[in-house]
Amino acid sequence: MADQPLLHMEHISKRFPGVQALDNVDFEVQQGEILGFLGENGAGKSTLVKILSGVYSKDQGTIRFKGQQVEMRSPHEAQEVGITTIYQELALVPYLSVAENIFLNREPRRVRQIGLVDFKTQKKLAEEIMADLGVEIPGDRLVKDLTVAAQQMVEIARAVSRNASLILMDEPTSALSSKEVDALFSLMRRLKEKGVSVVFISHRLDEVLAVVDRIVVMRDGQRVGTMMRSEATETNIIRMMVGREVGLFPKEDAPVGETVLEVRNLSGANGVRDVSFSIRQGEIVGLAGLVGAGRTEVARLITGADHIKGGEILIEGKPARIRDTADAVRAGIGWVPEDRKQHGLVLMMDVKSNISLAILKRISGLLGSVRFKEEREIAEEYIRALSIATPGISQTVSNLSGGNQQKVVVAKWLSAKPKLLIMDEPTRGIDVGAKAEVHALMSRLAKEGMAILMISSEMPEIIGMSDRVIVMCQGRVTGEFARPNLSQEEIMTCATRFLRLDAVDETGAVIAPTEAGDREVAMAVHQANE
Amino acid sequence: MQTTSAKPGGALAPQKTIWERIKGLFRITEFVLLLIIIGLFILGWVINPRFVNPGNLQILFRDTALLAIAAIGVGFTILTGGIDLSVGSIVGLAGVMSAYFMMTWKLPIWLSIILTLFLGLLIGLYHGLFVTKLKMHGFLITLVTMGLARGAILVLTNAFPITGLPRGFTNIGQEYVLGIPIPVLIAIVVAVVAYYLLRYTYIGRQIYAVGGNVDAARFSGVSVDKRIILCYIVSVVCASVVGMIQAARLSLGHPGSGEGYELLAITACILGGISFMGGQGGVIGIVVGALLIGTLQNLLVMVNVNPYWHKIVISLVLLAAITIDYARRRRRV
């Protein structure tokens, strides 16, 4: 028997309008363990973490930390107690150095009374702390010049230097390359040796299995299971998370009809160069490539978000003039954007208003008044069809979970009955169960005759869902493959085609890949060389 | 064992106790404002019974009507996440311009009114174009107009009022229909039209969407620029209407008219629950907010508060309103 756990939460409940986010949950973390905390989006993981880090208040329950009952009323209080959370969005000051960030607000002083900072000692101490964790970053480097991975390490180092005994990491690996993930994992193990406990939240099960000692699974606001690492497998974790078996990538063959969209020699100021392809009814065309390859930019040209510099867009064989997004919507093009909160939803509006946003004119009558009854019926129809989990059509969208929000965006476009639906990273940030649902839905839509252009960075998704794959690199199409001749290796080769040449385009201008692109390129080249 | 009530995500509306219903009422901005207004009326009646004389009430409602029209206009711009600071200057300009058209150019009353409204439309259009095409914040471009319009008034009038406006025009500000002052009737029409537009039409819904999330609205095919331009036009046209009614009331185009009116109009909006972040609030709130300020101003006069203090009182009310607005948003969940 282990003695008293480091953290012991009992009977924690938390209610949001319309949702019981946490329902009488017990949660414990042992001293010096790495705990995998899993569950679908909306299962309650983030809520629990936010209660622990003092962002939310709990409705009920007690928290004991190091044997003492504690109340965290703010993130600051949580840190005082010894609980630090590393979020996806990092909390460092970009224009200060690494050492300054680590010692922010408790800088070593040269002369205590007049507050002169002893920069030399500060740098030395910071580097010592990091070296102790196996991290080597110069203490005087500005944080803005570091990669995301390195920034994360700095944040962890800061937490450790403040005597954190529990570090919560919410999706820390989502922006990291595989090599960086490995580095993070060895850091986590180092923390464990030092007796610090880590709670690790991730959607990537393989990563979780690689590093944790124990797994706690949540579903629908309740704790549904605990497993030691030795007894956990991906299959039984998924089953526990969703409460059912999940099929992956069920794209079925659909009858292929007329050409819906054809782009010829499309170019734009946003970096797209000379792109041509077409999509027919019933087809799902995958747009593959690395981050920064220009895939989203192609979508932005087709949807009128960016201006076209050259080439043309044909819809059902006829040239279409698309000057703005309104033109595109009128022409029958729908776009489920990558970032649903920024581009897809009006978060403070209700479900019904979000679903009807693209068809308001169509459901308006005399004097422009919206036919509310029709609007309600449409909303209810799609809530049912997509099984959106919401207490009603008047629920504010911000209260829904990520997967359900995504479904609302999809519902918005389905109600507009588009000929072409562009889906940019349709399952990003969605949990396993909802992912399978979205895939099944895409398959069904294709079967009903819709043409779908899918942008995805997940290779299994590209290969599983696409009838055809178009590969892009640096704004150009570098390859096209049709089912069943889809191979990960060939797609990857095309995706990195220009990267081995000098990155100079026809005009002689040097192409500056984005920072994120850079990282993926390095990764891809590394993989390709193996 | 623990008895569990309401399952998570249950679609059934839970039974509410009377106490919960009352608590719910207090969460409605309009209701709380009405309570405060009633309180002010009782206070006024106790301190100075003449406060509730029909004569004074007519003045009160006429003032409120003008403020409500201007506030509804500004409210449209705030809904989109912008602002219109030119309201006060436009009120002055419209009064002077309509008088100028009638007295200097000897134009008929109806044509002067139409020309003044058209001028307002043009100014609103130019605001809207700067905001949408140059992506300028409404604060800046309307600040420019605020100064320009005031300057134009002085140039046009040499700082002297334009007097002798015809009877037919002054009736608009001074006469009654069925015992109701005409300005109040105009305000009711404006409020009803604005309410209908925002609440029932697709244009209104799109305005809220633009205020809530411009990008999402744009990607959903909403003609964002058109909606924003419309809101800036509505704002200046409303202010122009107020300016003309004001001139009609005073029987002259006064160069100083409308001074500081933007403060009152914006305060009415914020009081009425129009969020400065855009996308939230409604016409009823604005009207109630205007009524509160109208009542407060009238009360200050009736209980003989030194006029120099009026602006301080109104500004403190604004401070209270924005504090509540921001505190509500910051409240921990």
Image (spheres, coloured by chain):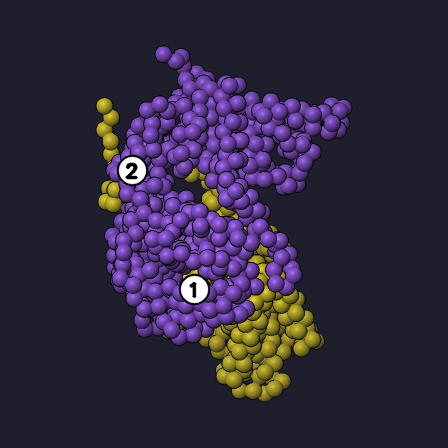
Q: In the rendered view, does A434 fall on the left or right side of A312? A: left
Q: In the rendered view, does B57 fall on the left or right side of A43? A: right
Q: 10 Å neighbourhood of mark 2: few (<14), some, or many (≥20)?
A: many
Tell me which corner region of the image, top left, top right, bottom left or bottom right, holds residue B145: bottom right
Badge 2 amino acid: Val
Of the numbered discs 1 and 2, the one sitting upstream in the chain is: 2
For residue A242, the mark is: 2
**Residue lying at 44% horizontally and 47% vertically, measured from the top left:** A489
- Where A435 sits versus A295, above or below? above
Q: Chain of mark 1?
A: A
Looking at the colours in the rendered structure, which chain would you say is drawn in purple? A
| Residue position for label 1 | A277
> Can see residue B75?
no
**Residue lying at 69% horizontally and 25% vertically, measured from the top left:** A124
Q: Toward the viewer: B95 or A144?
A: A144
Q: Toward the viewer: B94 or A446?
A: A446
Q: In the rendered view, does A298 fall on the left or right side of A242? A: right
Q: Colour of chain B?
A: yellow
**Residue lying at 53% horizontally and 87% vertically, measured from the top left:** B108
**Residue lying at 55% horizontally and 36% vertically, measured from the top left:** A149
